Image (cartoon, rainbow, N blue to C red):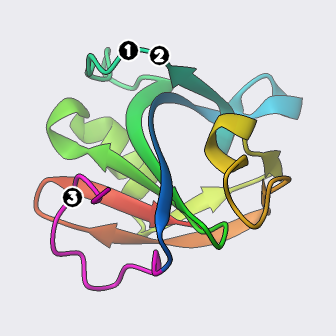
């Protein structure tokens, strides 16, 4: 299975891709009622119908999530579906800020070497491609 965004040379996904899912990523911090920065919730979508982010500054956005056998995770956010305010707020500093640890859903990690994978609090590089922002954990 190949990532949906081609030619991102900075990619760290080097193992065999084991999962690729569609999800709505709700931005924010769970302990702060989904305010601030980071990932508040990951809602896996059973359907593959892609829905754009809505509103001037939506609190959630569609993502394609890929994980490999080693537990590395990549989230792809399509720029064409994001408002300029969302691009600036969440991706404008060329890093993706996570204000609180978040446990990844089992649908993403169950076939990897890290089934209890947690995205740790911190700043993560954003790969700025022509049509998407890519964040790797």
> Where in the figure is residue 129, as x and y percent of width and height?
19, 66
Residue under the point 65% across and 41% down = 39
Q: Is residue 70 magenta?
A: no
Q: Residues within 10 Å of mark 1 (few under 14, many from 20)?
A: few
Q: Quadrant of residue 94?
A: bottom left
CB under 8 Å between discs 2 and 1: yes
Residue 123 position in % (x across, y down): 63, 70
Instruction: Tell me the residue that label 2 is attached to.
Output: 46
Name the residue: 80% across, 54% down: 115
Mark number displayed over residue 5: 3
Position in image of residue 89 (x %, y %): 43, 47
Which residue is label 1 attached to? 47
Residue at (16%, 75%) from the top-left corner? 7
**Image spot of residue 82 (x, y percent):** 25, 34
Q: Quadrant of residue 118?
A: bottom right
Of badges 3 and 1, the one in the foreground is 1
Q: CB under 8 Å between callouts 2 and 3?
A: no
Q: Is residue 79 left or right of residue 102?
A: left
Q: Of helix, strand and loop, which one carries label 2?
A: loop
Q: In the image, which residues are magenta? A: 1-14
């Amino acid at each position: 299975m190949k990532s949906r965004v081609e030619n991102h040379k900075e990619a760290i996904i080097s193992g065999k891709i084991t999962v690729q899912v569609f999800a709505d990523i709700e931005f924010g911090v769970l302990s702060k009622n989904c305010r601030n920065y980071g990932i508040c919730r990951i809602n896996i979508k059973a359907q593959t119908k892609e829905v754009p982010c809505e509103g001037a500054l939506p609190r959630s956005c569609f993502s394609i999530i890929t994980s490999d056998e080693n537990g590395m995770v990549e989230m792809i956010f399509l720029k064409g579906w994001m408002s300029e305010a969302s691009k600036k707020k969440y991706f404008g500093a060329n890093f993706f800020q996570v204000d609180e640890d978040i446990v990844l859903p089992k649908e993403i990690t169950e076939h990897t070497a890290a089934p209890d994978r947690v995205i740790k609090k911190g700043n993560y590089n954003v790969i700025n491609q022509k049509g998407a922002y890519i964040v790797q954990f």
